Image: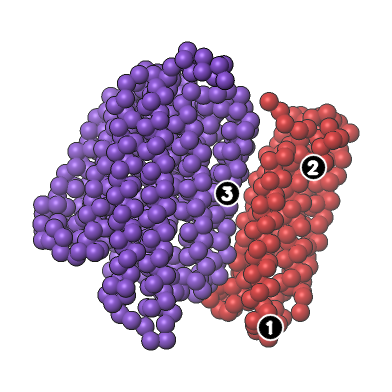
Chain colours: A red, B purple
Amino acid sequence: MHTETSVDSAQPLPGDFAIWIFIFAELAVFGVLFAAYAFARSAHVDLFNVSQLTLNRTYGFANTLVLVTSSYFVARATQSIKAGRGTACGNWLAGALVLGGMFLVLKLVEFHQDFAQGITLSTNLFYMFYLALTFFHFMHVVMGMVILAVVTYKAYAGRYSAANHTGVETGGSYWHMVDLVWIILFALVYVIH
Amino acid sequence: MKYQSQKVAKPYFIAALALFFGQIVFGLIAGLQYLHGTFLFPELPFDVAHMSHTNLLIVWLLMAFMGAAYFIVPEEAQTELYSPRLALVTFWVFLTAATLTIVAYLFVPYSHLAAITGNAALPTMGRGYLEQPLPTKIGIVLVALSLLFNVTMTLIKGRKTSINLILVGSLWGLALLFLPAFYFPTDTVKASFGWWWIVHGWVEGDWELILGALLGFILIKMTGVDREIVEKWLYIIVAMTLISGLIGIGHHYYYTGAPSYWIWLGSIFSALEPIPFILLIGFSFKMLMQRRREHPNKAAMLWALGTPVMAFLGAGLWGFMITLAPAQYYMHGTNFTAAHGHLAFFGAYAMISLSIISYAMPLLRGRTANSSAAQRWEMTGFWIMVLSMLGIALALTGAGIVTVILQRAADDPMGFMQVQDKARVFFWVREFAGVGFFIGLLVYLRSFFIAGEYEYASEMKQALAV
């Protein structure tokens, strides 16, 4: 038995409904983490402000651009498959994967720099949140890339069409969530003073 | 019952219930020893009664899970079990090892037991729930490997369903998570880590997945709801269990010498651990409301609906009470923990075990459902046990409150034994509730000896006559 399809215009959420339950659950968990960050910050404002200045905002901003662009590519991929162009869809998704890989590399370089300076989860409360939040997000980028990789493969294999491409929208929705979480994270942890 | 080899589940289920009976006998003894410390001393001191109570619990639950696996995997995979003989041999090995271990606890002084079972070569004895001598622990591993081999080979040659994959996968997890039992460093912080990898990893992770798989199987069979719908619910429940429980292990690391970032990470993630239990309630009741058939085994349906509710109360609600670091600072290791432990273990794992037994045993005995009379006895047993366990939890919570006020949060704290004395009334209530539970268990067990199968004809007549 098939539940909703993206062709049915009465269905407001694109892709498989189950991924949206998962997306809402993930957003809720990250939301709780962000709330905890805000709560911790309110009790240690000076510590957070001083430690925040040591973060590399160039890397953070570059990563934001990388992820936002990758989301654009995913949107273009969905557009392509809606026009029945499977290979083009695969190409756009492959591009998104490359950008996802760039995010991971940039973040790993940043982590390396942090550890080289002796910054760990135990350094102070700010760094604990910074490392924990960015590491959790990192793992979700990895998961998103695994999902996108599967969708990319299927797109190239011709398994999607204009009438049937729920997988593309499902994977794309998850990727957009990962992007959205980073945007909030970057603003909250790297920028807001 | 579709496959002949499923009948190997029967001895596992019978042994599970016999060991459950033994567990409660020791529980009553230990509970009375709270009030009369020298009751049965020195023949059966408290520590022996306590570890017999807890070890029997774990073994009967494992027996039930194994029986459930042997019943469910062939049916889901749509093929006979790989080796029914291996399953039966393994049963006797497990039962013999478990029985000998309890006998050893009762008749051999513990330190002597350690000496004669090679504990000096590889120390594993002395920790709660892991009191078993080294040979028993090795036996548990071998029994687990036998189960895993058997069900995995069955799964490989048959249909792979979500239920099957989750069940077999989490049985692998159960076995792997037992391995830290062989890791017992002298550093107490590290030893504590290892202990919790087993205990938390089992009951707040792996076993929740087993619960989900078993509940999903029962609901598919009893309600006739589409498998796809059940599977989607299960994936979400599994995901939320792992999301909350993996880092949630940190709620055992607050005050055990671990780095202080666990205070934050453990609190945040363990606060989310009730979510899968809330989802399980929604899941079971939604499937009930969408049912396409009226299954004659009303008792099994009652167990299947009662399990998520009691599991939520014991694991979700009572667990949440003690999970946040600032609260746990005062409540750690008090009777709040005991209240949570009892209600959660019974509500989640005892009840899902009794649920699968309730569903499968009639089938193993050649009928779809037991007679109405037998089901009435069973359902009465259900209610008496459930209400009694709630009584135990409330009583122990009362004792916990006394401890926190007088011993933990007070400006001028009282000593431990003084406070225990003040809490006596709660330990009496607990013991009465325990006797109630035992009566409920007897009523429940009686139901197995009421003959006859479900009276379709007369039940239909009655329904139509209304």
Quickly name the residue at label 3: B278
Where A135 falls versus B360 (above or below)?
below
Q: Chain of mark 1?
A: A
List x then y, in percent, for residue A6: 81, 35
Q: Chain of mark 3?
A: B
What residue appears at the point 28 percent right and 29 percent down from the top-left corner? B11
Q: CA distance from mark 1 to mark 3?
A: 36 Å
Quickly name the residue at label 2: A13
Where B158 falls versus A38 (above or below)?
above
Q: CA distance from mark 1 to mark 2?
A: 39 Å
Out of B333 and A139, give the one closest to the viewer.
B333
List x then y, in percent, for residue A86: 81, 33
Using a 10 Å C-alpha cutoff, classify the residue at mark 3 as few (fewer than 14 neighbours), some (14 to 19) or many (20 or more): some
Tell me if label 2 and label 3 are in contact, CB under 8 Å. no
Out of B221 and A16, give the one closest to the viewer.
B221
Q: Quadrant of the N terminus of chain B?
A: top left
Quickly name the residue at label 1: A45
Judge left or right: residue B229 versus residue B203: right
